[in-house]
Amino acid sequence: MNKTFLAILFLVSFIKIASCQEKNNIKKVFLLNTEKHFISSGDNFPDFGTKKDSLDKFLIALHKDFTVKDFQNYTHFNDAKIQSIISLLESKNWLHKINNTYKPTIFIADDADGELLYKYAEPISKNITKSIVKNLSKIKDEFQTTEISKTQNFEKWSFLILSNVLLDNWQINNIEKHFLKQKNRPLRNGKNYYCQITENKNSKTEAFGIYGNQYQSLEENKYLGIYGNNRTESTLTTSKNIISKTDNEIFGKIAENYLPELIKILEKHRKYSFEIYSKLAYKNEITFEEFFIWWYHFIYTQSTNEMNSKGILSIPENGNFDFIIIE
């Protein structure tokens, strides 16, 4: 048999195998269970869905270094459909070109990303835990000025105060303003919000076990809140844990008093944070601010878990702390 013909035959076979492997690899993206999360307030949410036309999978594929063509080959979308998807995402500021390659402008993380984000969070989260332990006596004294303390002890409220008040909901705006130096959240088609798309293998808990808040309006200036990472309490309609307007102001002051310590830690690790931002290749996709605001959720979740393991705070058995807050 002609050697040239054999070489061509081998090349064709190799291309077919490579194409098949590529298709099988991108298939993993389409098998992921994904969900969206936002950091926003008021009427600042996207006005389009990401499940239609697999927009979420398209962005994840680009994050995992698949090309637009890889996505098109798998979905069998025609050129017009692909261009329509690109135009939509660009118009919403969810997609842009970096070095002539399409990349998401929002934070993307699958399970493998999550493992690394927790791994590299350790130096910061451990410093935060040590800092809170150092300030614990002062924080407890501040709690004693609340109406809550007259009938309930600090231990019961420790999860909410040491995690949510010091690090999350009562603090997140301060992190944006004082560490990220951002006056406004990213502008996306007239709306200001941060957005992430993540893999979640367990629909009963939040992605990566991250602690967060769910709120439901009960009446004017009165809300039911749930802080934790367990979704089984979503049907809750009331709570015995009441945060009055006065106590809410005290909680805000507790967060404000701890803020200089927290900012000091984050500033100490700013260079390291930029190194991780580059190491994990998010630098090739999104801004540092977009990266850090979501990575911070991994950081404070890890601190929370460490404090729990050390007995500094107590996480409820169901993983959630419910409360009613009056503003």
Image: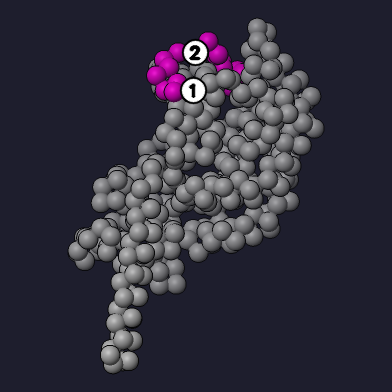
Q: Is residue 29 left or right of residue 117?
A: left
Q: Which label's residue is closer to the chain start, 2 or 1?
A: 1
Q: Residue at x 72, y 25 (%)?
A: 311
Residue 47 percent across, percent down from the top left: 30, 44
Q: Is residue 18 left or right of residue 131?
A: left
Q: Residue at x 68, y 17 (%)?
A: 155
Magenta segment includes 245: yes
Image quadrant in which you'd find residue 260: top right
* Helix, strand or loop under label 2: loop
Above or below 55: residue 137: above
Q: Is residue 92 visible?
A: no
Image quadrant in which you'd find residue 6: bottom left
Nearer the observer, 174 or 215: 215
Report the magenta residues as a range: 232-248
* Residue under label 2: 239
Image quadrant in which you'd find residue 319: top right
Residue 258 percent across, percent down from the top left: 71, 34
Residue 234 percent across, percent down from the top left: 42, 23
Q: Residue at x 58, y 42 (%)?
A: 298
Q: Is residue 7 left or right of residue 222?
A: left
Q: Is residue 248 visible?
A: yes
Above or below 289: residue 16: below
* Helix, strand or loop under label 1: strand
Q: Amino acid at mark 1?
A: Gly
User: Mark 1 packing: few (<14 Cα in 10 Å), some, or many (20+)?
Assistant: many
Q: Residue at x 64, y 54 (%)?
A: 273
Nearer the observer, 67 or 1: 1
Q: Amino acid at mark 2?
A: Ser
Q: Which mark is residue 225?
A: 1
CB of mark 2 within 8 Å of CB of mark 1? yes
Q: Which residue is outermost to the top? A: 151
